[in-house]
Each structure stands twice: as structure tokens, then as C-alpha cells.
Image (cartoon, rainbow, N blue to C red):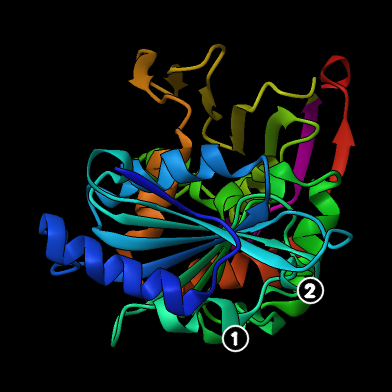
Amino acid sequence: MIVDLPDTTTSKISKKIMSLREQGGVIALGRVLTLVVVTKSGLEEEAIEAANEASREHPCRIIVLADAGASAPTRLDAQIRVGGDAGASEVIVLRGFGELAEESESLVAALLLPDAPIVAWWPHGAPKSACDTSIGRIAHRRITDSANEPDPATALENIRRTYKAGDTDLAWTRLTNWRIQLAAVLDQVDSSPVTAIAVEGASDSPSTLLLAAWLTLALDAPVTIVADPAGTGIRRVRLSRASGDVQLFRPGLSVAELTQPGQPAQRISLPRRSLQDCLAEELRRLDPDDVFGEVITIGLPLTNLRSVHPSER
């Protein structure tokens, strides 16, 4: 069910939610958190769809703050989605015009679930300092997505400069399966140290930078990034060792080939992760991601990355 509330207030929205519960038995019992999505009007549907899917694992109240334009007369339009239109959540879309276009704690305060953690998510338009925004200050976790920024590398640098415990980025979450596979391989090979690292990935992918930073921090070896065309994602990691190289190569979108000394090549399922999968993973943990904190603040500056074209390898 979708209920539109044009030119309204948060008090009227709260009363309408209570009315819907009384009329249709829609309740907030079992909701484990409040997810606040900060975006622009016209970009909210993809984020709502991902949040709805993630809510099937983490029932929550989703509040979407959609900037509808600061130049328009000040007003607040709202939409409440419950039942089949909201997954396992309640979705409240707030479209702010004029003075209400800017994200503000005051807009969401009356709609937050009592005594429940708050997660803030900026799917587009990451702030320069998430923890210093009005919503970021009240959130337990703050999720950005540098891959959706005009300059992903600059977005990562902003996170590094302003990082506080609780910050994370979906470019890091997309690396989970790569990190699991590489860690498993290194646990199985002999103790010969890694002397050089090569990470091949898309030139526009912040995940490529974060993977290189994680590896150089974990293995204390020089790293080179091999730049592939934009939009291709991560393709290859090669770990050079005196006893033989270890390579994980994904030529397509879902299957990778692992080669290592003395063993036949192995085919491994390594699909690109969906937005829903990444968001659901981040909602599983409400404590700070300490590994991400170390990679973004220590590993990224240590990499001294040198990008080369694949033909120069």
C-alpha cells in the first residue's frame, strides 16, 4: 500500500503511520534499526529497492530524504509505503523543497524507531565529511558509495581525511569475496614472502584502490595497479613470490581462475556483488569496521600507487 501526503508535516506523517497500524495491522514490532537514505529526488527508487531487499534480512524502518530542490517554495511532500510495497520494512519518503531540501535531523527525529540503531546511507552525492552532517552525527553507521561519485579517488581521499569509527563505503563491501578468496589462498601456500603485488582493475573503480591498499598493508609489499577500461571492475590480482606466483583472474563477471605453484588451475565462483547484497552485509554489523578504518587511513597513503596500462605489464 502506498499513501501520498502532499504538503505535510512530520507530525501528520507520524499520525498517519499510527492510523495505518490500527486499520491494517501494520506494526513496527521486530524492526531492528532505522535506515536513513539521503539522496536527490529522482534517484531514490534504486536505493529504495535495494533497501527493501536488504530489509528481508534486517527488518527496518526506511526513511528517505530526497532533495527536491532548494529553489522551490518551501514544503514537504511525503509518501508512506507498507506491506508488499515495502518488503519487510516501512518506507517513508520525504521530498523536501526550499528550506527543507537540505538533510536535517529535525526532519527525521519524530519518525525514528525508539531505542533502535540508526544507519545513514548516501547512495549518491556523498558528503565531504559524513560524520559531520546533521544525519551523520546521530547515526551509528555511515555508508557512502564512492563508486557513484564523479571522482571516486577524491571521494576516497575525503573519507580518509574525515574518517571516524562507524564510517564505511560500498566500494569496500564489494571486495568481500575477493578478500576471502585471497586470504584463503595465502593460508594454504608456503611461507615464502610476497615480494610484489599487481592489481588489475577498472580505472574508475575505487574498489581497485582499496584492494591494493588492503594487500599492501597486509603483506608489506610494493603494489602496482594495472588500469583497465572503465566499467570492467576488478579482473586480476597477482602476488609475486620466490616460490612461484599466485594469481586470481576473473575474465568475465562471475567465474575466476586461481593459479598457484604446483597445483592445477581452479575455477572459483566470484560474481560481482549486487547493491542489495552489499547493503545487507553492512546492515549485519552495527559496530565499526576496524579493518576498513586501517585500510582507508593507513593502507591507502602507504600504497604510493603506480598505474600502468595492461600493455606495460
Which residue is at a point 36% across and 15% down the rendered structure image? 267
Label 1 to label 2: alpha-carbon separation = 20 Å
- Residue 255 pos. (x, y %): 42, 16
Q: Is residue 43 above or below residue 22?
A: above
Q: Is residue 239 above or below residue 70?
A: above
Q: Magenta residues?
A: 216-227
Write the residue at 53% across / 27% down.
Answer: 247
The secondary structure type at the circle numbered 1 is: helix
Residue type indicated by callout 2: Glu
In magenta segment, residue 226 = yes
Image point (14%, 66%), residue name:
22
| Helix, strand or loop at mark 2 | helix
From the viewer's perspective, is 272 left or right of 167?
left
What mark, if any, has residue 137 been given in the picture?
Answer: 1
Binning the other alpha carbons within 10 Å of mark 1 as few (below 14), some (14 to 19) or many (20 upward) gives some
Percent x, y for residue 33? 31, 71
Residue 49 at x, y percent in the picture: 43, 38
Q: Pointer 2: what residue?
A: 99
What's the residue at 48%, 27% (across, down)? 272
- Residue 303 can be seen in this image: no
Residue 93 visible to an observer of this rendering:
yes
Residue 172 or 194: which is nearer the viewer?
A: 172
Q: How far across and how far down the image is residue 294, in percent?
A: 59, 72
